[in-house]
Amino acid sequence: MYIPEAFKEEDREAIVGFIRSCRLATFVTSAPSGLIATPLPLIYEAEEGPKGTLYGHLAKANPQWQDSILQIEALVLFQGADAYITPAWYPSKAETGRVVPTWNYVAVHAYGNAEFFTEPDRLREAVSLLTRLHEDGRPEPWSVNDAPAEYIEGQLRAIVGVRIPVNRIEAKRKMSQNQPPTNRAGVVAGLSESLRQSDRLLLELIKP
């Protein structure tokens, strides 16, 4: 990922928090037939290994786990809030006219060699962790133990676990840092009036 110095995010705590806040990632691997990608919810164990480890699972019918070239790095894409930024929000537009549209966004790319596993105990643990993560905070959180044991066993036979020890992370936070304070304030004002709820998610990320 191309990351100009102004947009480079190096704060580990911020990166870990961002990865964990992304509910759905994109898991990309290389196969003899070309690239394969699967949208995938993942768990990030930040303290497992130098740069953390990702866990998830795929359907056993998904050819990605069988076709992936394991000696080649896999790529996991985490995409955060994003918004189109119009030059009309920049006060400098009226002063010089030397402005163009752009896009603000947050993204993290994690790299590592994927390992696939089918052991029932490991699969159950990974599924249970993922379930607890996303059920947390619900009035009556669902648990893997709520379903009949034989049903869960059948479901586990239909999936394949994936473990990705991360060896490289690229993090980008592009939030108008390259603009003067007056233009950043204009972006904040413009986004605050946007009818798109997703645009307003960026407000706390931009510093006027």
Image (cartoon, rainbow, N blue to C red):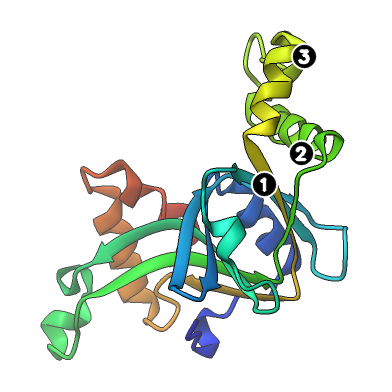
Q: Could one spot residue 207 in this view of the protein?
A: no
Q: CA distance from mark 3 to mark 2?
A: 14 Å
x, y percent for residue 162: 70, 52
Q: Pick whichever, 75 or 139, lies toward us.
A: 75
Q: Residue at x 51, y 48 (%)?
A: 62
The amino acid sitting under disc 1 is Gly
Amino acid type indicated by mark 3? Asn
Q: Counting residues from the N terminus, which is met first, the one under dot 3 or under dot 2?
A: 2
| Local SS, label 3 | helix
Q: Which residue is mark 1?
A: 56
Name the one closer to the observer, 58 or 12.
Answer: 58
Q: Which residue is mark 2?
A: 126
Q: Residues within 10 Å of mark 2 (few under 14, many from 20)?
A: some
Amino acid type, residue under disc 2 in the picture: Ala
Q: Are marks 1 and 2 in contact (CB under 8 Å)?
A: yes
Mark 2, secondary structure of its residue: helix
Residue assigned mark 3: 145
Residue 165 horizontal side relative to residue 205, left or right: right
| 3D distance between C-alphas at marks 3 and 1 | 19 Å
For residue 69, what is the image quadrant? Answer: bottom right
Q: CA distance from mark 1 to mark 2?
A: 7 Å
First in sequence: mark 1 vs mark 2:
1
Left or right of 74 in this view: 78: left
Position of residue 134 measured from the top left corner of the image (x, y, whole percent): 63, 30
Q: Residue at horizontal 67%, vertical 44%? A: 160
Specify whether residue 138 is in view.
Answer: yes
